[in-house]
Amino acid sequence: MFASLLLSASLVTATPPNVVLILIDDLGWQDTSLAFGLDEKLVGRHFRTPVLDGLARNGVQVNQAYASCPVCTPSRVALLTGENPARNHVTSWVHSGQETDGPHPEIDLPDWRKIGFQPGDAPTLAEAFRKAGYHTLQVGKAHFGAGGTAGADPENLGFERSIGGSAAGHPSSYLGTRNFAAATSEPGAPPAHNDVPDLAAYHGKDVFLDDALAIEAAKDIKISLQSNKPVFVWFSPYSVHTPITANARFLANYTGMNETEAAYATMVETCDAAIGTLINTLREANQLDNTIFVFTSDNGGLSQTARGGFPNLHNLPLRSGKGSAYEGGYRVPLVFSGAGVARGATLDKTWIVGSDLADTIADLAGVSFDGPDAESFAGAVRSGTDVGRVSPNVWHYPHHRGFGGPGLEPFSAIRKGNFKAIFFYGDRRWELYNLQADLGETRDVKRNQPERMKELATDLLAELYRLGAQFPTERETGREILPMYE
């Protein structure tokens, strides 16, 4: 009898954990109920995310987490592959193979990989999980490859099934009553680029897009678990990307607010409720205790345009927002919870980047994967030990978003320890910040710390060379503009 109990216990232990990666679109660092280490939230106190709060209480909250790029496609590809965007040259968001940001008035920008990520470009996390016997499911926004390419279809990148994924960076509409389609779409006409596929069953119905995606994800998860196959779910709501649209079922929670910000808050709450739908599905299947949850965002919160209130202030105390060289551009929420994850822990000194998540998630699940630019923090997540970080990270975004806010210029940046150096290619200026003392990046300390400035500049150029990064060029001479500090 005792031997049979041991055998049963070993079989339970050997059961591969399910993995649910929740990747929210454009969600800022303070766009949830969580404060991520701040003594007091300066913005976002109205957000309601009780499901995420529960995951954080029972898991590991990472107070210093980053996307790999301040815009979506590069950061999503980095998470999928463990590659820094500087390596694969997918350094901006893709559409249909054309330039997606405007030209710079003074310099020429690199001829980057405008078709985005394609099958065979690099091994993917989805392929690794599929090879390990998982059912791999992508739900919601994909946006890995450009329209009209094989990379636009997640089922070409290691996912067995995709629901709602395409080359679209945002939906034409969040409303089922509008068929999640462009207002100009006519019956029988080819779908517009941003029309959401796979959801015809909800057309004409009073349902919000991300609610429908959660329902469909739950159905697929249930089928897979009934066949005793573990699931790897890449769940990526289209919220909170524009067009900012109110989910009517939550709007009463935000009465008296700016209309746009109230609508934005309902989109945040929609994402939280969608996670609850997935949790309930796993609970009903008796798999909740055997599931790893990872919650994060693909870049910093939108703040330059389309939001209510004053621009460039929605991510305080962080400076600026999506697309920026400053912390508001790519500091994001990050929570781990579930099977094998420490309970009630906080990592405050250990900063983790999106590309690191590829190896970290694989290691937590016991799946073999080795991203070329990823560092696994699975040990810290399992133990809750705040180990800190030794290795630097670089962000490379040589693109022009139009000077609409602070740091929305072609740049490269490096963080090493608590210091971050930024090089802006347009006017060749350097800035240096001590993030521990000045999270809002208000005091440039390069003149006070010339040796550290030189060290980080040298390291940034060396890292970009190692990765094979593309550089902007001088318009008159065609010479590369390199981040060199004199």
Image (cartoon, rainbow, N blue to C red):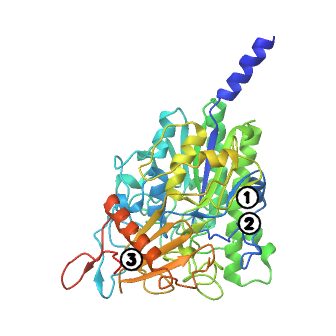
Q: Is residue 307 above or below residue 394?
A: below
Label 1 amino acid? Leu
Assess whether mark 3 and mark 2 are in contact (beta carbons under 8 angstroms).
no
Question: Which residue is at 44% across, 76% downward?
Answer: 451
Residue named by callout 2:
34
The x and y percentages for residue 169 are 48, 66
Mark 2 vs mark 3, CA separation in Å: 33 Å
Q: Is residue 192 above or below residue 426?
A: above
Q: Earlier in the sequence, mark 1 or mark 3?
A: 1
Q: Which mark is residue 101?
A: 3
Question: Which residue is at 76% across, 57% downward?
Answer: 51
Looking at the rendered image, the disc whose residue lies closer to the viewer, 2 or 3, is 2
Label 2 amino acid? Leu
Q: What secondary structure is marked by label 1? A: helix
| Residue 273 in view (yes/no) | yes
In the picture, the quarter occupied by the N terminus is top right
User: In front: 119, or 481?
Assistant: 481
Assess whether mark 2 and mark 1 are in contact (beta carbons under 8 angstroms).
yes
Residue named by callout 1:
52
Q: Earlier in the sequence, mark 1 or mark 2?
A: 2
- Farthest left residue? 477
The x and y percentages for residue 437 are 63, 77
Q: Residues within 10 Å of mark 1 (few under 14, many from 20)?
A: many
Q: Earlier in the sequence, mark 2 or mark 3?
A: 2
